[in-house]
Image: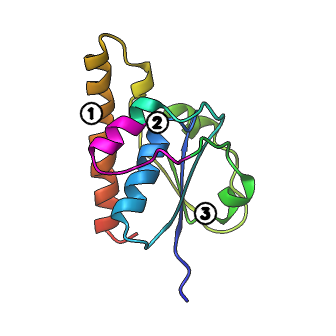
Amino acid sequence: MEKKPLVYFLCTGNSCRSQMADGFLKALGQDRYEVKSAGLEAHGLNPRAVQVMKEAGVDISTHTSDVIDPEVLNRADYVITLCGHADEHCPVISGKNVTKWHWGFDDPAKATGTEEEMMAQFRNVRDAIKHRIEQFVQKGF
């Protein structure tokens, strides 16, 4: 049985962006990838992220907010940071040849305004992440 590439999405709190990327790759990758996500800290799963992903047909309600696991990090084939803070503070990856990318997205959890305006920011970030995941899958990484 062929080993699936391990994709590890990293963010500061593993509450929004990395969770969305995780959910989309699991949904769009058709079981071609082992997908995990984590944060420098665990801030809990953001309920707005769960809601906007549900609107897009992806259920992330059972995901957990986790801290980076060095073992997973060191066996990952792709490490993808989704915020500048995680990119700058990502632990050193030792061992094998890992591909590390930074896909910067605004933090929707920092959105202000009315509930409608904040949800609009979550949807914008969700759609941008979905687009990047679609490109990743199409290119067959």
x and y, in percent, of residue 39 in the image: 61, 40
Circle 1 SS class: helix
x and y, in percent, of residue 2 in the image: 53, 86
| Drawn side of residue 69 relative to residue 1, left or right | right
| Drawn side of residue 8 relative to residue 94, left or right | left
User: Which residue is disc 2 drawn over?
Assistant: 16
- Residue drawn where x is 33% and y is 44% of the image: 54
First in sequence: mark 2 or mark 1?
2
Q: Quadrant of residue 47?
A: top left
Q: Is residue 111 above or below residue 93?
A: above
Residue type at mark 1 is Asn
User: Which residue is disc 1 drawn over?
Assistant: 124
Magenta segment boundaries in residue numbering: 50-63
- Residue drawn where x is 39% and y is 27% of the image: 108
Q: Is residue 133 above or below residue 45?
A: below
Q: Look at discs 3 and 2 and give the one toward the viewer.
A: 2
First in sequence: mark 1 or mark 3?
3
User: Which residue is disc 3 drawn over?
Assistant: 76
First in sequence: mark 3 or mark 2?
2
Q: Quadrant of the N terminus?
A: bottom right
Q: Nearer the viewer, residue 17 or 60?
A: 60
Circle 3 SS class: loop
Residue type at mark 2 is Cys
Q: Within 10 angstroms of label 1, few (less than 14), some, or many (20 or more) residues?
A: some
